[in-house]
Amino acid sequence: MFNKKKHMDEGLLVCIYYGPNGERLIRRGSKIAKMFGCPLYILTVDSKPFDELDAEKSIYITKWKKLAKELEADDFILKSNEQRPVYKVIAETAREKRATQIIIGQTVQSRWEQITKESIVNLLLREIPFVDLHIISVARYLRDPDSNYEKGVRAYLMTDGENFRLVFKHSKVIVYEGIFFKEYGTDFNNGIFK
């Protein structure tokens, strides 16, 4: 690790969290860093101390460190036992490493989450407005891999009197846009809309 790069005025920070998308984000970050000829930093944040992480999380970290070395990342940063909000830790790390580009994975929020929680994207843009934020969609899969739902597809809700109707083509009368996860084993459009 710690390779000299051509363009030290740029720096790329990839932010990952446990799950199948971490590797994809690291690889995407590596490609972008190579295009810019700039340093690549990889960050993961956990509220638990490193020695209290479960086996699955430890396996992810080991895989990511190996991938970081293989892709010649400049630093792999694990912030464990972290009690601050994640966006604050990302912003602090971006400042320390002088990152001008940040890659994060953006999951789909339910309508309720959109109303009650502010998006990490908005929080980061307010905290560190000097960076370019790359948001890689990780929305097409539900959080529970053992669920009874198919892979998500783009869908829309439109009003039908006092009810909503699910449609799969965009039109001017669309009220909500989201991802629809259809239940396995049904011919009807039963499922979850997020």
Image (cartoon, helix red, strand yellow):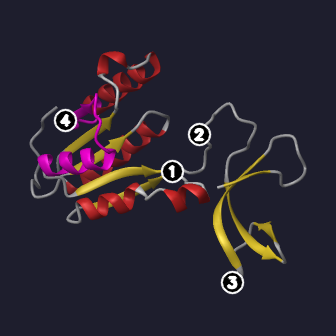
User: Residue at coordinates 27% horizontally, 39% vertically from top-left?
Assistant: 42
**Residue range highlighted in magenta:** 70-97
Q: Is residue 162 visible?
A: yes
Of badges 4 and 3, nearer the viewer stands: 3
The residue singled out by tag 3 in the image is 172
The numbered dot on residue 75 is 4
Tag 2: amino acid: Arg
Please tell me which residue is depicted at 22% across the width and 42% down the height of the picture.
41
Tag 2 and tag 4, C-beta contact below 8 Å: no
Give the Cα separation between the discs numbered 1 and 3.
26 Å
Q: Which residue is mark 2?
A: 143
Residue under numbered circle 1: 107
Is 30 on the left-hand or right-hand side of 92?
right
Q: Secondary structure at mark 2?
A: loop
Circles 3 and 2 in contact, beta carbons < 8 Å: no
Q: Where residue 183 sits: x, y (%)?
A: 79, 44
Q: Amino acid at mark 1?
A: Thr
Pick whichever, 8 or 46, lies toward us.
Answer: 46
**Residue displayed at 55% across by 53% down:** 108
